[in-house]
Image (cartoon, helix red, strand yellow):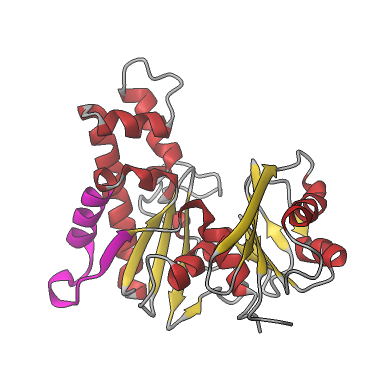
Amino acid sequence: MNATGPAIGVDVGGTKIAVGLIESDGTVTDSVAAATPEQATGIPAAIVELIGQIASPDGFHAVGIGAAGFVTKDRSTIRFAPNIDWVDMPLGTGVEQRVQVPVLVENDANAAAWGEFRFGAGRGVDDLLLVTIGTGVGGGMVVGGNLVRGGSGTAAEVGHLRVVPDGRLCGCGQRGCLEQYASGSALVAAGRERLTDAADISGTEITHRAQAGDPVAMALLAEMGDWAGQGIASLAAVLDPSMVVIGGGVSAAGDLLLEPLRDAFNRHLTGAAHRPAIDIRLATLGNRAGMIGAADLTRFAR
């Protein structure tokens, strides 16, 4: 394996598959995307077809795939995915049989955390917590320069930290999960209740209204930031990261989200006045973080 040469990075989402040819320094030299097949069993072939559009068969040494869901410890099989009809899906094997190079599968938020750690906002630190705030809330952790995957490969499901005992019912089956209060879906639900003419409003529209000075939209983002800050404070009390990186689509709100998030974080962090400040900043790699991180992880697989 030529670990210094290009690798393929793949980001599999519920609606889109993005594939890039990634150099060892994180540079994306070419990329392509297509709609995710309606039948999940067609995804391995779709990935291979996209790879063929940007790379020759001998033009890469490995494939790294980031996908939402629980990934087995051997980084080959999707045990369960919330937005794609996968249960015990051998995604890695399905692609590897077609491309004849090693294939690594990783949770998409883990891959994004690694991408930001290596090439984005987290360069220069050894300990990082990434929290992605989009339709749901995801996360990834790097501790001592190593990606934390847990005993079975399913660590860092930070969106399912319970913040309200017996609170709102979550899609995971539990109640009171952070995702029910600090996600884009929660923001939209609150917006439809409290904004006028908002029956079909989106999170992007709420952000635009807030940026234009709408006080209700600004309050919605502030409340969301407050919930996120409380949850992240609990995580930081356990993990003590040097940096917290905020990614995902809702992070486009910038300071309208970050300022209340930081304020809540500092108010709720145990012993905040007696410990070094924890830097909280926005992710810098955008929607390519998972693709870049997945490709780079192939260089570190053991």
Magenta segment includes 208: no
Image vertical order of residue 254 relative to residue 59, above or below: above
- The image position of residue 214, as x and y in percent, is 23, 26
Q: Residue 275, located in which quarter of the rendered image?
A: bottom left
Q: Residue 153, located in which quarter of the rendered image?
A: bottom right
Determine the residue located farthest toward the right in the rendered image: 97
Q: Residue at x 33, y 52 (%)?
A: 228
Which one is nearer the viewer's eye here, 113 or 22?
22
Q: Is residue 267 visible?
A: yes
- The image position of residue 188, as x and y in percent, is 41, 32
Image vertical order of residue 1 relative to residue 108, above or below: below
Q: Residue at x 69, y 46 (%)?
A: 84
In the visual, does 223 lie left or right of 293? left
Which one is nearer the viewer's eye here, 240 or 146?
146
* Residue range highlighted in magenta: 258-281
- The image position of residue 292, as x and y in percent, is 56, 64
Q: Is residue 167 visible?
A: no
Determine the residue located farthest toward the top in the rendered image: 197
Which one is nearer the viewer's eye here, 296 or 173?
296
Determine the residue located farthest toward the left in the rendered image: 273
Numbered circles on residues, count: 0
Q: Residue at x 26, y 52 (%)?
A: 261
In the visual, does 97 lie left or right of 10? right
Image vertical order of residue 181 relative to residue 124, above or below: above
- The image position of residue 32, as x and y in percent, is 66, 49
Q: Quadrant of the C terminus?
A: bottom right
Q: Quadrant of the N terminus?
A: bottom right
Q: Residue at x 35, y 28 (%)?
A: 191
